[in-house]
Amino acid sequence: MKLTKEQVEHIAALSRLEISEEEKAKFANELSAILNYVSELNQVNTENVSLNSQAAGSANKMREDKTEKFGREKELIAMAPEHQGGCVKTKAIL
């Protein structure tokens, strides 16, 4: 598939890019080559290929969420400029 100069201009406009005339010709060739390669990949028979979400075959490894007490929590919270109910108060960030 060969892209035209107008198609490259349209892609550049959608991407909010300003490109020169030289770049339009260059990108038309490069993008056409990419689209040709993708079209070749679409022709590959993948009918008997199993779906994989992990290339290495591993799965998400989860651990139990545990908290640890260090014994100085009250002292550290007391040093905060503002605190309430055992928590440090901060300004809203949203």
Image (cartoon, helix red, strand yellow):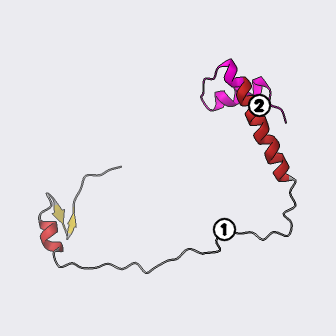
Question: Considering the numbered disc 1 on the image, is that residue within a helix, a strand or a loop?
Answer: loop
Q: Along the line of sight, which residue is nearer the eye, 88 or 64? A: 64
Magenta stretch contains residue 4:
yes
Q: Can you say whether 81 is above or below 76 in the image?
A: above
Give how far apart the Cα atoms at labels 1 and 2 are.
Answer: 32 Å
* Residue drawn at 43 percent across, 81 percent down: 64
Mark 1 vs 2, N-terminal side: 2
* Residue to which mark 2 is pinned: 29
Q: Where does residue 68 sit, x and y in percent of width and height?
A: 28, 79
Q: In which quadrant of the rendered image does the N terminus lie?
A: top right
Q: Where does residue 49 sit, x and y in percent of width and height?
A: 81, 69
User: Residue lying farthest top?
Assistant: 21
* Residue drawn at 22 percent across, 67 percent down: 87
Q: Are marks 1 and 2 in contact (CB under 8 Å)?
A: no
Q: Can you say whether 78 is above or below 65 in the image?
A: above
Please indicate whether residue 89 sits to the left or right of residue 15 in the image.
left
* Residue to which mark 1 is pinned: 55
Task: Say which amino acid is labelled 1.
Answer: Ala
Q: Can you say whether 44 is above or below 61 in the image?
A: above
What range of the chain is rendered magenta? Answer: 1-24
* Residue drawn at 69 percent across, 31 percent down: 11
Q: Along the line of sight, which residue is nearer the eye, 69 or 47? A: 47
Task: Say which amino acid is labelled 2.
Answer: Asn
Q: Where does residue 83 sit, x and y in percent of width and height?
A: 17, 63
Residue 6 is labelled as none
Please indicate whether residue 57 sits to the left or right of residue 65 in the image.
right
